[in-house]
Structures are given as structure tokens and as C-alpha cells.
Image (tube, rainbow, N blue to C red):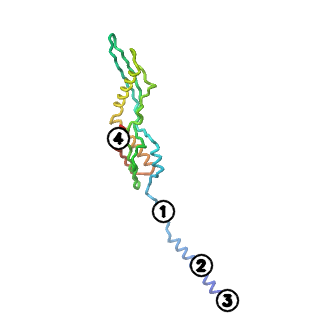
Amino acid sequence: MKKKLIIIFALTLAVLLAIMWLVYTISHTELTVDADQQIDVTPEQITSIKAIGEWEFLSIANEELVDTVRKGLLSDDHLVRVYYGTLRLGVNMHQVEPGWIKTEGDSVTVTLPNITLLDRDFIDEARTKSFFENGRWKPKDREALYKKAYRQMLERCLTPENKQRARENGEAQFRRMMKALGYNHVAIRWQEPNKRNE
């Protein structure tokens, strides 16, 4: 009987000690949650940004009045045509260089291709009108007039000021996108101009 009491006392003591240890452990345990401040652009996000392809930052609608005169013996032939076009300036995301996006903590540096003319076929020939036509004109004469209008539109619209406006629009759009991804500090850089794309 004495032996049973000793065993019961020992078991009761063991259970009490276990309960005390459990209460002590719970009361002195802290639960902490650490937030990982590191933000990473995933390969999928980079691929989806590149997949945008051509990204337009500035659209310029233009019209050109172009004329030509052919001198004749008795009278001159005169051809005046109006050409309409829309020049789109932006970047081709397929031209980004390796390492074009770099992250460090909540900072990101994005290096974009230089601003370029996205579509070289910008004259809307369906809207081209003959403003005045007198005499007989061959298709090669009209082609020469088209090329003249094309050059004038390029000269009028591909100005340093318009390229700068497109650059500023591009920077604003990329800054908004990167901030939406969680980056607080966004630096936008541009690749060196490629004369072929100017």
C-alpha cells in the first residue's frame, strides 16, 4: 500500500511539474513576425513587361501641304496635295539590354531603349487629297511628292523637344508601374542612342 502511495505521489508530482513547466514556457514565449523588406521582380514580371513590345509614349498628328510645279512652254503644271500622318514615339521593349532592370531592397533601376519612331509607315495614304491639280502627272511624280511630305513630317515631328516629351512620359509611366510593384525609389535611365533607330 505504501508503495502505491509513493507511485501515485511521484506521478502526481511529475504531472504538476510538467504543468508548471508548460505554463512557464507559454508565459515567457514571444511570437514575432518579421516582414521581408526585400522586393524582387520575378522573371515572369520581367518577361511580361518585355512582351509589351512597342510602348508608345507620344503620338503626333500632322498634316503637310506639298506642291510641285512643272514648267511648260505655254503654261505651268501644278500639283498640290495634302498628306496626313501620325508619328508615334516610344520604345521597343524587345531592344532592352541584358540587366536592364536591377533591384536592391525597395529601389529599382530601369534602363530603357532610346526613344525612337515606332512605325515608319506613318502617312495615311487613304486620307491623302489632291488640293489642286492642273496638268498631267505620272505615278512617279506623285511618289516624289509623297517622299517630300514624308521628309517634311519627319523634320517637323522628330524634334529634340518631342523626343524629350516622349522620354518624360515614358519615365512617368514606368515610375508608376514600379511604384505599383512596391518600389519606393525608382531610377529611370536610357540606353545610348542608336543612330539606326533615330
Which is more N-terminal, label 2 or label 4?
2
Q: CA distance from mark 1 to mark 3?
A: 54 Å
For mark 1, give the secondary structure. Answer: loop
Q: Residue at x 44, y 46 (%)?
A: 177
Please report whichever mark, 1 or 4, sits nearer to the chain's N-terminal start. 1
Amino acid type, mark 3: Met
Assess whether mark 4 and mark 3 are in contact (beta carbons under 8 angstroms): no
Residue 47 appears left or right of 149: right
Q: Which structural element holds mark 3?
A: loop
Q: Where residue 5 sits: x, y (%)?
A: 64, 86
Disc 2: which residue: 15
Above or below residue 66? Residue 91 is: below
Where in the figure is residue 179, as x and y percent of width and height? 43, 49
Q: Are marks 2 and 3 in contact (CB under 8 Å)?
A: no
Q: Which residue is mark 4?
A: 194
Q: Nearer the N terminus, badge 3 or badge 4?
A: 3
Q: Residue 114 location, x and y as percent?
A: 36, 41
Query: Which residue has dot 3 on it?
Result: 1
Mark 1–mark 4 distance (CA, rounded to whole Å): 49 Å
- Residue 33 circle label: 1
